Image (cartoon, rainbow, N blue to C red):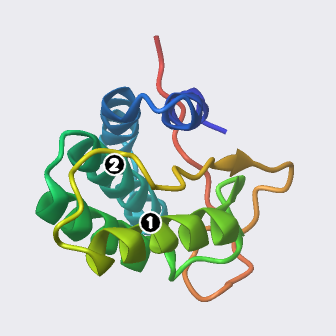
Amino acid sequence: MDERLVRGVAQFNARQFFAAHETWEDLWLDTVGAERELVQGLVQIAAGYLKAESGIRGGAIKLLTRGVRQLRQYPATALGLALTPFVAAVAADLQYLCADATRPGGLEGLRLPQLQIVQEAGSCLPGNHPARVRLPMKGP
C-alpha cells in the first residue's frame, strides 16, 4: 500500500482536511486507471470537508457529492480501504448540509467519518471485478 494513501487516511481521520487533500492529490498525479478515479474521490471528499470547515456550504455540497458518486462505484473494500461505511457517513453529512440552507457554516453537526484501513486490499475496479491493481510506489 502506498504510504501516501496511508498518510492521507491518518490526516483525514485527524480532521486535517487540507493536508489529506494535498497528500492524496500527490498520489492521484502518479496513479492510473480505476485507482486514479478512486483516489480522485478521496481528494474531492477531503476538499469538500475543507469547504465545509471554511463555511462554504455550496462548495462543500458540490465536492462531497462528486466524491460520493465517485466512490460508490467501487467494491466495499478497495485499495485496502473500507469504503462502504465511509461513503455512507459522507452521504449522511451531505444530506445534513442539503437539508437546511440557513444552517451556519462549519463542521458542527457533521459526522466527520473515519476512513478505515483493512487487511485485505480487495479489487479497486468498479463493479467488483476480481483483478488486482497496484498503486505505484513513489521513490525518495
Asked if labels 2 and 1 touch by Cβ distance under 8 angstroms, the answer is: no
Q: Residue at x 46, y 63 (%)?
A: 38
Residue 136 drawn at (x, y percent): 51, 40
Label 1: how many Cα within 10 Å (few below 14, some 14–19, many 20+): many
**SS at mark 2?**
helix
Q: Residue at x 67, y 84 (%)?
A: 129
Q: Residue at x 26, y 74 (%)?
A: 100
Disc 2 marks which residue?
49
Residue 78 vertical placement versus 30 (above, below): below
Tell me the mark number nearer the camera, choosing from 1 and 2: 1
Disc 1 marks which residue?
93
The quarter of the displayed image where residue 30 is located? top left
* Residue 70 seen in this snapshot: no
Locate residue 14 relative to residue 99 in the image: left or right.
right
- Foreground residue among 97 and 71: 97
Q: Amino acid at mark 1?
A: Asp
Residue 103 drawn at (x, y percent): 24, 62
Residue 19 drawn at (x, y percent): 36, 26
- Foreground residue among 107 and 60: 107
Residue 80 vertical placement versus 127 (above, below): above
Q: Residue at x 46, y 10 (%)?
A: 140
Compute the Cα span from label 1 to label 2: 10 Å
**SS at mark 1?**
helix
- Foreground residue among 116 and 90: 90
Quarter of the image for the N terminus: give it. Answer: top right
Q: Amino acid at mark 2?
A: Tyr
> Can you tell which mark lies on residue 51?
none
* Residue 16 seen in this snapshot: yes
Label 2: how many Cα within 10 Å (few below 14, some 14–19, many 20+): many
User: Outermost residue, bottom direction?
Assistant: 127
